[in-house]
Image (tube, grey):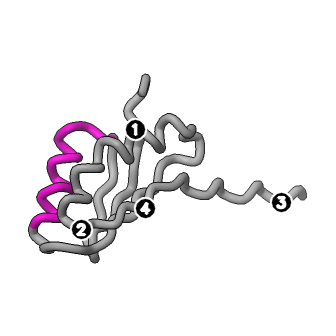
Amino acid sequence: MSRTPLIHVRVGRLYRSGALTPYLTELIVDDVRRRGAGGRIEIRLAPSADQADLEAVDARLAPLRQYGVHIVCRRARRPPAPAAA
């Protein structure tokens, strides 16, 4: 991954956003541990993210699966184009 993707993560009712740095990854892992086994993490990358970004984020957070966490990683939708006047 040549760039650090910007992500939006939801763990339960907790939301985190930012560049997926090792620090943010550690915070997400801690959030999951506090919630206990199971659960779901939803990750949204920028609409410009490519397949390599999706795979890199999934790989970086893969250790969370050992806690029974289901990880959903996808691109955010592009905002609609403005209507022509």
62 relative to 42 in the view: left or right: left
- The answer to if 75 sits in the magenta stretch is no
Where does the C terminus fall, quadrant-wise?
Answer: bottom right
Q: Nearer the viewer, mark 4 or mark 3?
A: 4
Residue type of the residue flagged with mark 3: Ala
Residue type of the residue flagged with mark 1: Ala
Instruction: Provide residue 3's location: percent of width, then percent of height.
Output: 42, 27
**Residue 68, disc:** 2
Residue type of the residue flagged with mark 2: Gly
Task: Estimate how packed mark 1 is, as few (under 14), some (14 to 19) or many (20 or more) residues with alpha carbons within 10 Å.
Answer: some
Label 1 element class:
helix
Label 2 element class:
loop
**Residue 65, disc:** none
* Residue contact at pointers 1 and 2, CB within 8 angstroms: no
- The mark nearer the N terminus, 1 or 2, is 1
Residue under label 3: 83
Report the residue at 33% width, 65% height from top.
41
Toward the viewer: 6 or 68? 68
Cα distance in 3D space between marks 1 and 4: 13 Å
Report the residue at 61% width, 58% height from top.
77
**Residue 72, disc:** 4
Cα distance in 3D space between marks 4 and 3: 32 Å
Instruction: Provide residue 5's location: percent of width, then percent of height.
Output: 41, 38
